[in-house]
Image (cartoon, coloured by chain):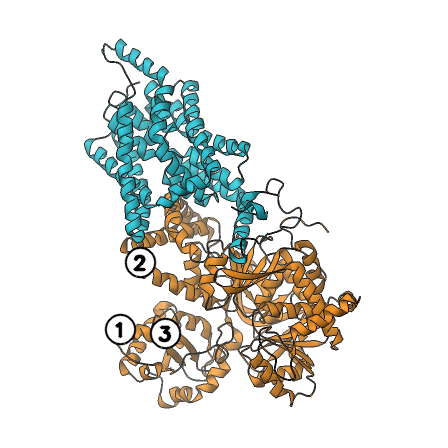
């Protein structure tokens, strides 16, 4: 099959995609593992596919059947992707989860998914599984991914299975090819248990069709000269789709990690990556800190550059109709403003051109300088971060999706960049905005003025990326998918330039006893702009007023002369509490656009940070039910001691 | 044509001198001794650059002067600009046009040194016709003098201009942080001063823009554009690869404007000085615009080969120098297959 330079490899299922990519990209590097900053170990497409076939053959010999669920517990590394190759090439599906999974979750997943064969990344994880094995009689084989460690008794090594498969293939075994030929489009390629922000884990069934539609429909032009940096957890479908997409265009994926990220960005100079808002917040902080430290002249130059970029880009967005349009703007107002923006654009252009080249380019080099696009997903990108990167010229494209939609529903394309939105839906995808109470369709509604744009409601999706259902949860599936429409549970609206704007998660909605609905997420995001607040969570379901749990940012208090040795100590200091009180009152007020009932009645300072795996999901979303449980006493305290202050 | 003899007031001249000083200091601040050594490492590129900078450009300038029948003062100025060395502006434009910055820097350093010998020779050779025309004009006006190109003065002004460059290099060695700041400030100041000069010229001699013959506009815009064009195709003819072609093209078209100001102010007198200076100002203004345009064009059209170059380079950096990136058959355009600059063959590493 002949492909044009920028065409993505297409196939009916992942296994065929892997084969096709191996044929097409042959000796090009597919994945690279970091050994040291300047030394990486590549694996070519051909080699990966060969090893994958060996593994698949070995797995078949160990009794893995077609459409079996194979556990795959571990984080980003080459062996993970090899294990995935093995599983796909023998026609099975994997059930992935990260290393940070708890024993209880592990047990639930292995039991619920009916896993008989599973991979464990490290020796530790293998030992944990061995212990659980007593309670899980169905689990027959545990295989360790880490090639360097010695496996404990009763645990197999992946290399050994590969070797076995190689021997079999040398003797003419072609069972893997038979399995590949037997894969149906609606077979699962993965079964992902979401930790989610609410309730018990649910197994999301994603099919080969789901995955292939994503590869087909993601916007962007990439080819085999692209470099993808991998930081987000691979077991999450967002990172996974980006890696599969990278395979389809022949790019190379470089495995980085949070700790080495900034160094790897300089060395790998990625052109593409999946990222999460938290990552950009960190990078933003770092850039600002560097600027603060730099020479005063430099700082001034940066300030001028940023100011000019802001003027320039805002006018550009207005002229090209890419400004955020939540409200209808009358045509006369627009035509009145147009000359101003055109004039500003022309006046600023030469200055912006110079400063962009001399100052902002150096900021961009901090992210490697070659980043053509990065999709940010897994949570809302705070608007000031979003604006910062787009002004500076690092195209952070915010996307939107859920594990259930494998995952991309919409993404801001580079050429149609409306800051503050998550862009238009990707190809083959339909959106609907529905009144969450009455179920009435608000968009698209031809009877309504402007087709229902600008109306708030729950987001419904229909498209090839929508999951097959929740595994063994027929009821839940029927609630989530009705008449082919998947109910996301998120609130949003379509802007007047046809982009989707996310307004919060309706499942997180707090209903006050007065019946007022409050979206906690926008409030939390607004509060987190304060330098004193590291993390926070708004509470108040069925209460008279809202409460707030705050994790303080210790360093800022030290700068303000409030000394302390630990967070526990800091929360006891009255000055800290007083400062916080003022800060909250400053941020949440009718002047900053909050309604009266959105006032924070009282707050409590938390003695510990929220941590990934505990209070936060891997994508840094707050697990509200966990926090509510853990700090139940504090929350009760807010409401028992106080009558709301006037 | 009546040309205002006092184009610049005394304070403007001081300002201009200060600007030249700062810009040359900034240029020096961007250079290291290693950049001079690098010249020896890429002799082919530098030689091609040399040929197009001191061979093509003066010829283009001469050709334009003859075809457009420029006034001798303008013609001499145009030829003077034609044989100037390159400046740091070209390095920045080369960077953004996805060209080889290393080659651009090498060419800048080589041409700055070479200009000491080449400029006086080329200038006196190419301007013979125009100087005699000037002399004839002056004789007709009743003057007894003969117009000659002040070769000695030109060399000494060039040497004088090199002083801040060397100071900048010392600054770079002593404090790289300061040098970086210097570089940016210099670029910023250059933009401001050129705009100031244009504006004051506009305010004081409003009619100047209308008085200036169209041919002068054509010549000042055309010199840069022709430089880009011929530099690009000449290097292609010699067999240079895209990233070097772009560097040579920009280096050929973009001349070191401030040096021309210095030479004109220090070495020439009225009645030609103002006219020469005016043309140099016009060239400096237009070249920023045209090279911005060309850079954007190069940036867009050079993306593909640049991506390949960059990717291969990173593969070699991370996977070791003997890693060979084998792009799928049919992926590389014919011209890039077996191209050493793309690093797709192990024996021909950069």
Callout 2: helix, strand or loop? loop
Chain bearing tag 3 is: A
Chain bearing tag 2 is: A
Where is mark 1, residue-wise? Answer: A560
Viewer-nearest residue: A497 or B46 = B46
A276 over B291 or under it: above or below: below
Query: What color is chain B drawn in?
Result: cyan
Front label number (1 vs 3)? 1
Rendered image: mark on residue A37? none
Q: Are marks 2 and 1 on the same chain?
A: yes
Where is mark 3, residue-wise? Answer: A533
Callout 1 crowding tier (Cα within 10 Å): few <14, some 14–19, many ≥20 = few
Query: What color is chain A drawn in?
Result: orange
Front label number (2 vs 3)? 2
Chain bearing tag 1 is: A
Where is mark 2, residue-wise? Answer: A294
In the figure, residue B267 lies in which quadrant? top left
Callout 1: helix, strand or loop? loop
Viewer-nearest residue: A381 or A319 = A381
B150 over A486 or under it: above or below: above
């Amino acid at each position: 099959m002949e492909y044009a330079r920028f065409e993505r490899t297409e196939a009916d299922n992942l296994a065929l995609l892997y084969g096709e990519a191996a044929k097409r990209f042959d000796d090009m590097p597919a994945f690279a593992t970091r050994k040291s900053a300047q030394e990486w170990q590549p694996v070519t497409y051909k080699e990966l596919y060969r090893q994958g076939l060996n593994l698949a053959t070995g797995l078949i010999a160990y009794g893995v059947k077609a459409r079996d669920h194979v556990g795959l517990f571990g984080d980003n590394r080459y062996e993970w992707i090899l294990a995935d190759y093995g599983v796909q090439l023998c026609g099975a599906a994997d059930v992935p989860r990260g290393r940070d999974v708890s024993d209880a979750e592990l047990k639930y997943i292995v039991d619920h998914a009916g896993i008989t064969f599973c991979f464990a990344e490290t020796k530790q994880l293998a030992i944990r599984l061995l212990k659980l094995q007593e309670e899980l009689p169905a689990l027959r084989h545990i295989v360790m991914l880490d090639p360097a460690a010695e496996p404990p008794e009763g645990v197999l090594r992946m290399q050994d299975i590969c070797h076995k498969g190689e021997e079999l293939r040398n003797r003419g075994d072609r069972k893997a090819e038979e399995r590949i030929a037997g894969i149906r489009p609606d077979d699962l390629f993965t079964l992902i248990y979401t930790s989610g922000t609410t309730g018990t884990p649910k197994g999301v069934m994603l099919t080969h069709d789901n995955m292939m539609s994503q590869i087909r429909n993601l916007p962007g032009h990439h080819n085999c000269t692209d470099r993808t940096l991998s930081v987000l957890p691979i077991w999450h479908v967002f990172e996974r789709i980006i890696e599969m997409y990278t395979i389809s265009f022949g790019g190379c994926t470089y495995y980085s990690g949070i700790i080495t990220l900034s160094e790897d960005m300089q060395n790998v100079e990625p052109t593409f990556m999946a990222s999460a808002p938290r990552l950009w917040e960190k990078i933003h902080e770092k850039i600002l800190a560097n600027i603060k430290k730099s020479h005063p002249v430099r700082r001034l130059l940066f300030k001028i550059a940023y100011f000019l970029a802001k003027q320039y880009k805002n006018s550009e967005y207005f002229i090209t109709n890419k400004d955020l349009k939540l409200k209808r703007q009358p045509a006369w107002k627009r035509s009145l403003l147009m000359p101003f923006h055109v004039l500003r654009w022309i006046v600023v252009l030469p200055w912006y051109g110079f400063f962009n080249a001399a100052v902002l380019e150096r900021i961009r080099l901090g992210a490697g300088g070659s980043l053509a696009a990065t999709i940010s997903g897994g949570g809302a990108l705070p608007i000031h971060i979003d604006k910062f990167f787009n002004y500076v010229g690092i195209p952070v494209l915010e996307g939107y999706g859920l594990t259930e939609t494998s995952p991309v529903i919409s993404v801001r394309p580079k050429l149609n960049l409306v800051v503050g939105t998550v862009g238009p839906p990707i190809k083959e995808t339909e959106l609907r905005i529905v009144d969450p109470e009455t179920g009435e369709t608000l968009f698209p509604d031809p009877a309504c003025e402007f087709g229902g744009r600008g109306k708030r409601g729950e987001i419904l999706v229909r498209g090839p990326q929508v999951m097959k259902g929740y595994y063994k949860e027929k009821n839940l599936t029927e609630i989530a998918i009705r008449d082919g429409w998947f109910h996301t549970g998120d609130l949003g609206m379509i802007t007047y330039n046809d982009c989707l704007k996310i307004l919060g998660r309706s499942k997180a909605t707090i209903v006050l006893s007065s019946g007022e609905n409050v979206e906690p997420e926008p409030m939390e995001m607004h509060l987190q702009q304060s330098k004193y607040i590291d993390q926070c969570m708004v509470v108040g379901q069925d209460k008279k007023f809202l409460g707030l749990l705050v994790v303080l940012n210790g360093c800022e208090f030290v700068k303000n002369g409030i000394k302390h040795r630990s967070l526990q100590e800091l929360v006891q200091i009255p000055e800290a509490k007083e400062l916080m009180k003022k800060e909250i009152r400053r941020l949440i007020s009718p002047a900053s656009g909050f309604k009266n009932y959105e006032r924070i009645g009282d707050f409590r300072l938390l003695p510990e940070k929220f941590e990934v795996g505990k209070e936060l999901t891997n994508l840094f979303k707050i697990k509200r039910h966990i926090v509510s449980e853990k700090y139940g006493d504090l929350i009760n305290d807010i409401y028992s001691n106080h009558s709301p202050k006037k | 044509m009546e040309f205002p003899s006092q184009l610049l007031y005394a304070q403007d001249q001081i300002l201009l001198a200060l600007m030249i000083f700062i810009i040359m200091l900034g240029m020096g601040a961007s250079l290291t001794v290693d950049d001079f050594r690098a010249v020896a490492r890429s002799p082919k590129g530098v030689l091609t650059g040399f040929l197009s900078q001191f061979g093509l450009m003066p010829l283009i300038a001469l050709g334009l002067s003859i075809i457009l029948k420029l006034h001798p003062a303008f013609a001499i100025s145009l030829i003077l600009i034609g044989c100037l060395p390159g400046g740091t502006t070209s390095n920045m434009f080369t960077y953004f046009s996805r060209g080889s910055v290393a080659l651009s820097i090498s060419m800048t350093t080589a041409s700055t040194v070479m200009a000491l010998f080449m400029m006086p020779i080329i200038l006196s050779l190419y301007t013979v016709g125009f100087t005699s025309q000037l002399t004839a004009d002056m004789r007709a006006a009743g003057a007894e003098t003969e117009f000659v190109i002040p070769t000695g003065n030109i060399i000494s002004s060039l040497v004088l201009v090199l002083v801040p460059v060397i100071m900048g290099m010392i600054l770079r060695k002593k404090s790289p942080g300061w040098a970086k700041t210097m570089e940016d400030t210099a670029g910023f100041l250059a933009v401001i001063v050129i705009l100031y000069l244009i504006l004051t010229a506009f305010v004081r001699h409003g009619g100047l823009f209308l008085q200036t013959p169209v041919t002068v506009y054509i010549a000042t815009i055309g010199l840069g554009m022709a430089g880009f064009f011929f530099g690009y195709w000449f290097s292609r003819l010699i067999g240079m690869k895209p990233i070097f072609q772009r560097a040579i093209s920009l280096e050929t078209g973009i001349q070191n404007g401030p040096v021309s100001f210095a030479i004109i102010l220090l070495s020439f007198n009225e009645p030609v000085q103002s006219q020469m200076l005016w043309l140099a100002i016009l060239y400096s203004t237009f070249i920023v615009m045209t090279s911005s345009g060309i850079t954007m064009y190069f940036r867009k059209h050079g993306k593909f080969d640049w991506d390949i170059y960059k990717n291969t380079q990173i593969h070699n950096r991370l996977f070791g120098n003997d890693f060979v990136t084998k792009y799928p058959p049919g992926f590389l355009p014919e011209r890039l297959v077996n191209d050493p600059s793309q690093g797709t063959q192990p024996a021909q590493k950069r």
